[in-house]
Amino acid sequence: MATETTATDVAHGGTGMAEAGMPQLDFSTFPNQIFWLLITLAVIYFVLSRVALPRIGAVLAERKGTITNDLAAAEELKQKAVGAEKAYNDALVAARAEAAKIVAAAKADIQKDLDKALAKADAEIAAKAAESEKRIGDIRAGAMEAVTEVAKDTAKELVAALGGKADAKAVTAAVTAALKG
Amino acid sequence: MATENAAHGESLVFHPLDQFKITRLFGEGPIEWYTPTNATLWMALAIITITVIFVLGSKGRALIPTRMQSVGELAYGFIYKMVEDVVGHDGAKYFPMIMTLFIFILTANFLGLIPGSFTPTSHIAVTAVMGFGFFIFVTILGFAKNGMAFLGLFWMKDAPLVLRPIIAVIEVISYFVRPVSHSIRLAGNIMAGHAVIKVFAAFAPLVLISSGIGLVVTPVSILAITAIYALEVLVSAIQAYVFTILACVYLRDALHPSH
């Protein structure tokens, strides 16, 4: 038992000594690593400098150019939009002024028509009123005549009925005087 | 029976560093410099991942990007801005190199988080090649671009004249320490995190051996694995970022040595 453990210990120690320390300090592997490292770096350098980096650089430059162009185009479009808005506003103001003018003209026209119609209506009304007045005058004159006639006749009859002899002339004069009075 | 139990108990022995071993992919034998190893495999997987994201992802060249293209574009924009901010406009020339470093480290770190995987960036050999390689590159570049004026990096003109030589000595020392800290920081962080996860993972099957204390230890260690794993996800990205931004700083010093 005891010998066994010592044996394993020795074996362990032995292997430990054989592979002493870090594999990093095993100089026998250095040429191998350096050789392969130089090849690797050369390949990577070749791949990057010949293919990858110019391509990526070109893509980045192209993207930068595109973005710059797009920004410029956007700025231009913005200016155009501002111009269009200004034109729209100008047109709106002009249209408003035009509309106001038209409204004023229409109002003036209507007023003129209205005045004419009013004047015509007034004239007609005045003519009708004059005619009516004349007719009323006629009717009044006719009525007066009739009243005089009736009064004369009535007075003659009254005088006759009262037994007097009616002098037609005197009766007429009296009635006329009474009507005038 | 007792010995069997003891043997079973000894199977709990920790090998937190075994995950960093370099092994042959095929057959037996020594590891030569050209032998395909697990390091080769996981570096190849990193290449494939990067190719899929950056080449296939951007294949459509879409103005409105797909998700994969978006990932590639975000990484591109992130590193490009970093290079431009830290190094300056003349740094754009070195952007593919910085991008290569960043993307390789980031991808290797993340692939290394797959359970059972191998993490190339946990090896000092890998990070040192990148760290020292970049250090040598920026030093040569500094002299090539500025000549002897590059040494002005160590000569503080704002400091009092008496202090300038002392500061210069300190600056020179710190300059040469840069690649060491640059590479050890990355490998150390990745290695430590992976080893800690492995230690907790070794505790996790304790319930199979001792149903007494194991009932407590197993859930706690599983929770700990989860927590450390989340932290490691963060560390993977942050260390890639730190390595890259330090590379940018060193590059700036090489291009513009005057303070």
Image (cartoon, rainbow, N blue to C red):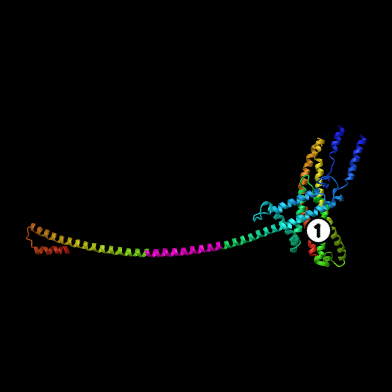
A81 falls in the magenta region: yes
On the image, the x and y values in percent for residue A14 come to: 90, 42
Could you tell me which quadrant the N terminus of chain A lies in?
top right
Left or right: A28 in relation to B96? right
Residue A139, placed above or below residue B234: below
Between A7 and B79, the one lying in front of the other is A7
Q: Which residues are magenta?
A: A80-109
- In terms of image quadrants, where is residue B62? bottom right
The residue indicated by pointer 1 is B134
Lateral position of residue A22 relative to residue B234, left or right: right
Residue at (66%, 52%) from the top-left corner?
B66
Q: Amino acid at mark 1?
A: Phe
Task: Using residue A178 as the reference point, say whether residue B137 is left or right of it.
Answer: right
Q: Does the magenta segment cover residue B31?
A: no
Q: Nearer the viewer, residue A19 or B204?
A: A19
* Frontmost residue, A149 versus A32: A32
Image height of A63 relative to B190, above or below: below
Residue B237 visible at all: no
Residue B147: image x %, image y %?
82, 67
Would you call the spot at circle 1 few (<14 residues within 10 Å), some (14-19), or many (20 or more)? many
x then y, percent, for residue B14? 84, 42
- Residue shown at 30% from the left, 64% from the top: A120
**Secondary structure mostly seen in the magenta stretch:** helix
Does residue B42 appear anywhere in the picture? yes
**Location of residue B259 with respect to B229 vertically, above or below:** below
Pinpoint the chain carrying mark 1.
B
Q: Quadrant of the C terminus of chain A?
A: bottom left
Q: Residue sitting at 61 percent across and 62 percent down?
A: A72
**Residue projecting furthest to the top:** B1
Q: Among all residues in the image, which is located at the extreme right?
A: A3
Q: In front: B210, or B42?
A: B42
Q: Total marks drawn?
A: 1
